[in-house]
Image: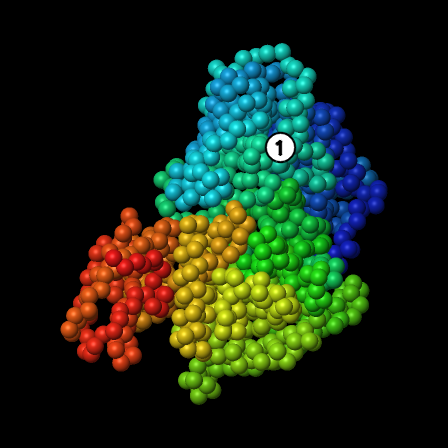
Amino acid sequence: MFRAAALLACVLAWTAPAWAQPAPAPAPDPVTTLLKRAEQILNSGDRAAFPSLFSGLSDEQINQHAFDLFMPGAVRTVVHERDRTDLEGAPPGDGYRVVVELFVETPRRAKIVTAGLDIRRPPGGDLNSWRIVRTEGVASVEGLFRLRLITTTQFAARNLEIRAEDLLITLQEGTVFQIDTEEGITGVILLGRGEMRFSPTPETERGQLRIFSGNETLTTPFEAAFLRLNPIDFQRLVTTSALTKVTPDARMVRRAQEVFGRDSPKSYVVDLQDLSRDTWHLQPPANDMLAEVQTRRFGILTYTRGNAQAEDVQLFQRDRRRTIALYASQAKLAARGRFYSDDALREYDVIDYNIEAIVDPERQSLEARARLAIRARASLSTLTLRLADRLEVSSVTSVEYGRLLHLRVSNQNTIMISLPRQLPQDSDITLILNYAGKVAPDPIETETLQTGQDQQPTGGESPFSNHEPHYLLSNRSLWYPQNPVPDYATATIRLVVPEGYGCVASGERVSGATAVSLRDLLTLPGGKPFVFRANQPLRYLAFVVSRFDRVLEKTIATSDEAARDPAGDRLLIAVEANARQRNRARQLARPIEDILRFYTGLIGDAPYPSATVAMVESDLPGGHSPGYFAVLNDPTSNATIAWRNDPAAFDGFGEFFLAHELAHQWWGQAIGWKNYHEQWLSEGFAQYFAALYAQKSRGDKVFTDMLRQFRRWSLADSDQGPVHLGYRLGHIKNDSRVFRALVYNKGAAVLHMLRRLLGDQVFFNSLRRFYQDRRFQKAGTEDLQRAFELESGRDLDRFFERWIYSSELPRLTYHTTIAEREVTVRFDQVGTEVFDIPVTVTIVFTDGKTKDVIVPVTEKQVEQRIPVEGAVRQVQINRDSAAIAEFSES
Ligand SMILES: [Zn+2]
């Protein structure tokens, strides 16, 4: 049947090199001839000749096809053959199953129809006698429009007001031009004296706006604005009573054209590749709105209401590419509640990836083929994948349907794949993509310390140093086609790298799989293949290529008990390094083993059966940790003074980065985050686990030093926003230290305070419960809170509200009274809100001995009497820096 034939075609395509894709069939070819004739009939509007393309179809079917394809006013129709297989049941050479795309265009509108056609030669027929005998699976992409600036009508405006959620755009005095599509007015251009006023409802967003503009409400004059909306919203949003028709003025028309030319291609545009070179626009969905406002002070500010987004109100600064505000509208909050997961927008699951790539680390390019096993979560007619724009896709094939149409959405690193028929919910499809091109390496920006605010680190290469280069492609580079909403998937990765290079990728290295295929030999003389298999699910796939040697490989037991039991749990650890670092890299064996055993003991599980550390040369310390491996920067320069002043620089704990990166195998990889707000579940946890390891390996002093640093940075930067703001912390000011200060350090400090409130046993039981509950899934703070509440039996709403969702810090005054056999401490919370905060009270006796007592301050005023034996010299408050608060004596 069709499926079998298509499968065969795919297998052939799969083994053929990418550069050997089938060329257009040489003429005279019966299919090309028939499709050419169809194109001529459609282009000439010759309805009478249309039925002559078919044989054996009912009049009703033919009429329906004519209705679909003869668009009133059509000016151009393109018939494009995408795929061809032999037709089952026809003698060889007498029939084909063909997938075609028809692009039909009127002066203002276009659509794409995808159809499967069975084409046959009648017995004894010649080249021109072939007919379409069956059609199926017609899918279409409708709603492609040509956008037009109406220059024949100009309006004078007085106090024109346009409102959207939390936004008011006023044109006090000026000129308005309309933009339309065939469906009606879909935008306006405002020129003149205007004012933009944006006042976000959420308190956190007002705080971000203050960081951006100095004020919680942004009020700024503008000279020009470009607005897009759906035609059905036009009357509602644009009060036409403020507009008066005037005679168009050539100078104003020119200005409007400039704005239109600049702003209109930025959004709602589709790139149709070989079907059309023109710019085709999509209509904004109803209730959506986009405004590009040209202000003098901030450049172009883009406001969007996009209902498809989980956070559907956004303010964006174009020139600096900064997100200023991003949050859910009132309607969205009412519909979905406070918490959300990116997964709600996921249309399908990728169950398994199989990727083969030839990697050229010097040119920073790859040539690859990816096979994705996909299961639909909803009924689908198109599939959207993310892939870097610079990677050119030469073909998209499915095992089930053969060759498929794919479209690039401009500048969005997105591919849309149109399916020949509706894919039912829970059904499977296997896609194969061939692609090639250059990909810029991943910046490890958040994990790498930075010397200055605006310095953008590169993938380990600096023009000023002679590091051994490395090429890291990970979660940011979009080097492989992936779900727009990432989910957990297993994977096989086969990489061919040039001779002399080594590589580390997500998965266990499959030994013995070193056979070089004919393809490898043809394309890359001397290339060396590496195969990695990940049977445990991963959030994303990554690899790093450099002139690596494997300096260590060792199987370790995950605990002392496991060591005694031959069947006990084992982990394979390995270290790869460049030649210059071989000795330093070998010294990592001991700490890697220690750290992995320590974490496995705390959590009761190791999510991945192997861990490889790849040591690379770099200016600055840092690292990155995908599943199954970690890249560790080995700083070679003497820039140490510059990075000392960083939230993540810890004196006296050389293994900090190693400990932090390895913790990500649990936190960040095995446990993912539901959306960007929840990144502290990865970074705060990795930071805290690194601190716990510091305490175990280096003792209490190093641990307390880290707590002190957590507190110092939390106090310094908490006014930049709540921990729950994720990557947006420091984003507006382009200072990633703010992100590390809060998401890493404050996140870790909050965990430590929670531990001190609940006690060690409840704390670690809760962590294990949370881990077991969410392993290989995404998590949110509410999941963590639930685990802690179930273990402790306590309501922790207020704890998380204050420490994670808001940016305020507690301010406490204290008073101590030393009596004969008793010390009394009184705390007052003088801020507006009451926090739950454990405070260490240290009683210092005259003989120099000390006694620590944790006082849980969970009311506005707390007084505690501490019985003492012996003479007290002094009482110290928060000596261990574990409480993130300001203290003053009252
Ligand atoms: Zn990290």
Lateral position of residue 645 relative to residue 543, left or right: left
Residue positioned 72% across, 73% down in the render = 515
For the residue pair 322 and 394, the one nearer the viewer reads as 322
Residue positioned 29% across, 56% down in the render = 812
Lateral position of residue 175 relative to residue 667, left or right: right
Residue positioned 63% across, 74% down in the render = 576
Display colour scheme: rainbow
Disc 1 marks which amino acid?
Asp
Tell me if the residue at label 1 has its CB under 8 Å from ligand 1. Answer: no
Within 10 Å of disc 1 (Cα), the crowding (few <14, some 14-19, many 20+) is: some
Q: Quadrant of residue 5?
A: bottom right
Asked if residue 854 can be seen in this view, the reply is no
In what element is the residue under mark 1? helix
Asked if residue 573 can be seen in this view, the reply is yes
Question: Does 616 appear above or below 183?
Answer: below
Lateral position of residue 24 relative to residue 283, left or right: right
Q: Position of residue 631 (x, y in %)?
A: 59, 68
Q: Position of residue 343 (x, y in %)?
A: 46, 51
Q: Position of residue 243 (x, y in %)?
A: 52, 15
For the residue pair 283 and 788, the one nearer the viewer reads as 788
Q: Position of residue 101 (x, y in %)?
A: 68, 39
Number of residue marks: 1
* Residue on which disc 1 sits: 263
Question: Does 644 appear above or below 738?
Answer: below
Residue positioned 72% across, 58% down in the render = 365
